[in-house]
Amino acid sequence: MRINKKWCSSLAASAVLAGAAVTGLLPATASAAEGGTPTIIQLGDSFSSGEGGGWKGNASTRAGSSQGDREGTDMAARQKTDGSWQYRPEQYVYEESTYRENGGHWGQNPCHRALSAPIQWVQQKSPEITKVVNVACSGAKSVNVWKPENGGVEQHSGLKTQLQQVADRVNSTDDVKLVAIGVGGNDMRVGDETGFGAVVAQCIKAYLFQHNLPGYAGFCKDTFEGEIGESISSVYYNTLKTIDGVRSTLASRGQPVGSYRIVLLGYPSITPTDSSDWSTVNESTQWDERCPIRRTDSTWVNNHVVTRLNNVLRSAATGQAVGFIDMRDAFAGHRLCESNTFRSPSSANQAEWVRYLDIGNVSPEHFAAQNLTTTSGEDLSEDLASHRHFSESFHPNHWGQQAIGDCLSEYWKNTTGNTHRRCFVGGVGPLNNPDNMALGTAPAQSTVTDVPANKHIGNPTVRQVTVPDAVPAGHYFQFSTNITHPRKGQLQIDLVSPNGTTHRLKQYNPGDTGAWGTGGEFIRSYTSDPSGTWTLRIYDQDQTTYNGTLNSWSLRNF
């Protein structure tokens, strides 16, 4: 097989946690079209489109053997009358227009919208919903959701942005009930790459180097630890813009704000967090199990990427008064290489709910010797005689898609308003079944708010808040402020952490003569213990003509 340096970027693009977010507003007194077509909408990336949804397990039996359906786990497989096997993912797994063109070549819309995508399960459990609009696309970033006039960009040539597609498919005769938004994971920038997939690719690289190159001891967390906090800040601001775009687009299609609910979906962890949760397989042989991630790295990714990503999305949901589902624990007990799971299970109760690294029989030594690079995704599938694209790796499989869909369905049927919930394995009926997920109270987020008695901004104004000792160490914090000032360029804002580090949140800029707006949220990396006294300093450099007030400010630890 020809080897080149495209592998890491290909894997990064394919293994995105293109998460699922869903927007929720307070219940409306009237909908767009009372008695109109009940409609639900899904926007987002691969975790919303349903990438990987055609697998009911991770059996490795190859096509062409006596078990061409891989021990019953491959939903695309059908056995012909002559005993041979054929594979039709475009018919049995994905919407045909979003899989590939005739002839086996990837088309302009390789969005991989699965027939088992999470939004489809909502309709299955709520038959009164008669119209499903799924415009999510594998690999999508927030910019691929927005309309072009708001900075949106086509994800693929000739493919409209997701909100453009919504505008084409929704009108005033519809009665939109729910909008699910699952995007953000691909917005993160880590090094020269973007997206959660870049983190996964680096973790695989660290694993292969460790177990195939004597003396190598690096971890993928060492590569990203210093920059992940700053990177995730873009997810927060982009999500605010996405929600605004949804509201304005639907309003233009006869769906007034408040006539439907919006809920943001967080992201699940796909490998175990605690070392005790892994199966008994030795770490050095995890390549054979197709979950080649070092356990220390898996713990770090779950605690400092997946958890923080859920928290940032929740913060955006709070800021926009929409709903949120924390998904970090949704696959607990069914993650890759987790104890008590089986490759070829007889039921979902025993299955892994995530697609393993599917690159055929390529050896780890081969990848390590070639600096972990290989051909592009399409060529790789052909080289491995696979009938599916390896981008399905590290995505929820059929059971995982069903679990996310059941979480969303439970949220739609059993909550009201802009409620925030967490989803976990459980519920009424057989435990460990994706058809019986449960909702619980969302994890607490520590927020300390200060409302000064004397609100006039001096030079400087100094305020302090104390974060309790009980707050766990976070990787970054969010600072929000409510300021009234006609000349924001006069202001300089510093925040001093308990260990004495000064974070310059806003620089003095006399050329900026605009008024302070509704913004004022800042996210900054902070790796130390957050407990202790935080000091805010606001400098007003010129009070001779213009003055302002500090109405309140808050500090939230992630």
Image (spheres, rainbow, N blue to C red):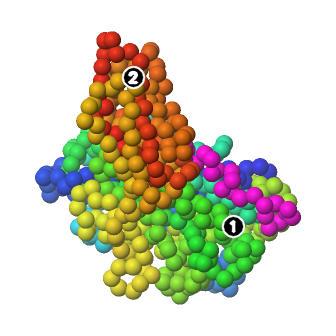
Front-most of residues 87 and 295: 295
Q: Position of residue 208 (x, y in %)?
A: 77, 63
* Residue that carries the numbered disc 2 in the rendered image: 459
Of circles 1 and 2, the one toward us is 2
Instruction: Kindly report the distance in space between the C-alpha atoms of the residues bearing marks 1 and 2.
Output: 51 Å
Amino acid on which the number 2 mark rests in the picture: Asn
Relative to 134, 85 lies left or right: right
Q: Image point 31% across, 31% down: which residue? A: 550
Amino acid on which the number 1 mark rests in the picture: Arg
Q: Image point 47% across, 33% down: which residue? A: 494
Magenta segment: does it hold 529? no
Q: Main secondary structure of the magenta part?
A: helix
Q: Which label is found at residue 294?
A: 1
In the rendered structure, which disc, 1 or 2, sits on the residue that comes first in sequence?
1
Q: Position of residue 126 (x, y in %)?
A: 27, 70
Q: Is residue 251 visible?
A: yes
Front-most of residues 385 and 147: 147
Front-most of residues 63 and 451: 451
Magenta segment: does it hold 220? yes
Neighbor class of circle 1 (other Cα within 10 Å; few <14, some 14-19, many 20+) is many
Q: Is residue 62 visible?
A: no
- Indicate whether 109 appears above or below 120: above
For the record, the magenta segment spans: 210-235
Q: Image point 51% across, 56% down: which residue? A: 473
Relative to 380, 431 lies left or right: left
